Amino acid sequence: MGKQRDRRERIDPAPRLALVLIRHSLGWFEQRELAAALGVAPSLVSMWERGERPIPGEALERTARLRDLSPPLLAQLLREIRSFLEAAQGRGRAGRALAGSLAADLLFVLLEALDVVLASRTRLVSIRPPAGDPATAEELWRYLEGCTAAERRLLVEEGEEYQTRALSERVLAGSAARAATQPREAQELAKLAARIAELADVSPL
C-alpha cells in the first residue's frame, strides 16, 4: 500500500487532472468513452486518472486534439493546474480550501474562454485569416496591464483595435501567468479574453 502511494506521489498529477477535465468538457462522463476514442482499454484510462500509471504524452495530446486543444493550449492548461497545486501547498486548511475553490472556478472560466476562442477561430477560418497581428496584440496587452478591470472592459468594448483573436489569446496567456499568485485577476482576465473573442467574431473585415 505504501509503495503504491509513493508511486502515485512521484507521478506528475497535472496530466491526469487535465485528462479528467478534458474528458468531462467533452461531455464524456464515463471513462470507457475516452478509452474507445483512444483505442485503449477502459482499465488503462482508469489507472491514468487514478495516478497509478503515468499518461504517455502522445495519449494526452490525442485527448487534447479531441477537444481541439493545440499543443500550446494543452501546455498552458498543464501550467494552470500546476500553478493551482503549488498555490495550495504550504497553507493552512482554510487557505488550501480557498485556493481549491479559486482553482476550480478559474479552471472552468478558462475552459469557457478557450471554447469561445476556438469556436471563433473555427467559424472564421474559411472566411478570413486569423485577425490581429501578434506584435500589435503584445503592445495592446502591455497597455491593458496598466489599466483597471473597468478600464479594460471599456477599451475592449469601444475600441475595434482591441477586438482581435490575437489579443484574446494574449490576454488568456496573461491570465495563465497570474493563476498562482493573483487568482482573482487571472479569473477577470480569462473572462475578458472570452469577451474579446466574442467581439472579434462580429468585428467588420
Image (cartoon, rainbow, N blue to C red):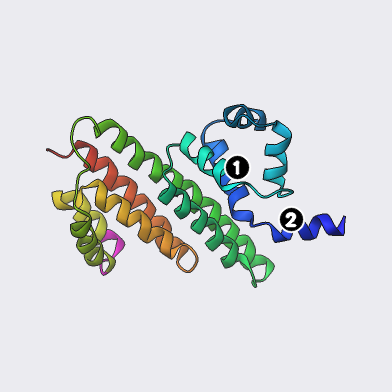
x and y, in percent, of residue 55 in the image: 63, 47
Q: What residue type is labelled 2?
A: Arg
Q: In the image, is residue 26 above or below residue 184?
A: above
- Label 1 crowding class (10 Å Cα cut-off): few <14, some 14-19, many 20+? some
Q: Is mark 1 on a helix, strand or loop?
A: helix
x and y, in percent, of residue 134 in the image: 23, 55
Q: What residue type is labelled 1?
A: Val
Whether residue 147 is in magenta: the answer is: yes
The residue depicted at 65 percent of the width and 73 percent of the height is: 90
x and y, in percent, of residue 87 in the image: 56, 67
The residue depicted at 39 percent of the width and 44 percent of the height is: 114
| Location of mark 1 (residue) | 20
- Label 2 crowding class (10 Å Cα cut-off): few <14, some 14-19, many 20+? some
The quadrant of the picture occupied by the N terminus is bottom right
Whether residue 133 is in magenta: the answer is: no
Report the predominant secondary structure element of the magenta stretch: loop
Q: Distance between the Cα atoms at labels 2 and 1?
A: 16 Å
x and y, in percent, of residue 46 in the image: 71, 39
**Closest to the observer, 102 or 36:** 36
The residue depicted at 20 percent of the width and 48 percent of the height is: 163
Quarter of the rendering containing residue 188: bottom left
Label located before the other in sequence (2 or 1): 2
The residue depicted at 42 percent of the width and 37 percent of the height is: 68
Q: In the image, is residue 190 above or below residue 86?
A: above
The quadrant of the picture occupied by the C terminus is top left
Q: In this view, does 128 lie to the left or right of 112?
A: left
Q: Give the range drawn in magenta.
A: 146-150
| Location of mark 2 (residue) | 8
Which of labels 2 and 1 is toward the front? 2
Q: Are marks 2 and 1 in contact (CB under 8 Å)?
A: no
**Closest to the observer, 5 or 59:** 59
**Closest to the observer, 41 or 29:** 41
